[in-house]
């Protein structure tokens, strides 16, 4: 990931509704949710939700797939992984023990 991509991803997540959408989709991996279902769960008008989903998709954080008459949205975990690694890869000046608490927290996700 480069600076431009990281800024796009962080910018997409820097808005409350989009952050809520992304977190909701992460909780529904791997199945994802239909756009209408996302809008209903977050109480957001569907046309507004469409705009938010487009921004997240352009930032590489969300993927979509048409299923019959619905569009299913999924969190792009590869995009999340790339952003997270971009942010922390150079941390700790090479001292892995400094990052150990972060790694321990992530290990709980298994």
Image (cartoon, rainbow, N blue to C red):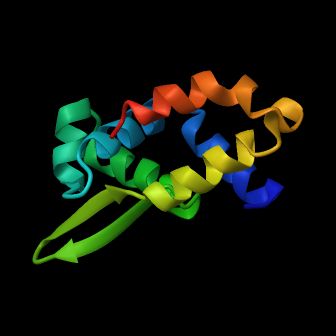
Q: Is residue 108 above or below residue 1?
A: above
Q: Quadrant of the N terminus?
A: bottom right
At x 79% / y 60%, what residue is drawn? 2
In the orientation shown, which residue stands out farthest toward the left?
Answer: 68
Q: How many marks?
A: 0
At x 74% / y 34%, what residue is drawn? 96
- Closer-to-camera residue (84/59): 84
Residue 56 image point, x, y percent? 50, 53
Left or right, residue 95 beside residue 35: right
**Quarter of the figure with residue 23:** top left
**Quarter of the figure with residue 24:** top left
At x 23% / y 75%, what residue is drawn? 66
Residue 45 image point, x, y percent? 28, 40
Left or right, residue 25 beside residue 79: left
Residue 39 image point, x, y percent? 24, 42
- Closer-to-camera residue (70/82): 82
Q: Quadrant of the C terminus?
A: top left
- Closer-to-camera residue (84/40): 84
- Closer-to-camera residue (90/9): 90
Q: Is residue 107 above or below residue 58?
A: above
Left or right, residue 63 beside residue 40: right
Residue 77 image point, x, y percent? 44, 55
């Amino acid at each position: 990931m480069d600076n431009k991509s990281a800024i796009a991803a962080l910018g997409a997540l820097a808005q409350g509704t989009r952050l809520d959408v992304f977190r909701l989709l992460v909780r529904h991996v791997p199945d994802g949710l239909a756009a209408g279902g996302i809008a209903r769960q977050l109480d957001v008008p569907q046309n507004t939700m469409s705009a938010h989903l487009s921004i997240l998709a352009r930032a590489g954080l969300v993927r979509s797939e048409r299923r019959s008459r619905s569009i299913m949205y999924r969190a792009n975990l590869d995009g999340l992984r790339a952003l997270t690694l971009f942010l922390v890869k150079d941390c700790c000046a090479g001292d892995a023990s400094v990052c150990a608490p972060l790694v321990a927290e992530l290990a709980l996700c298994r």
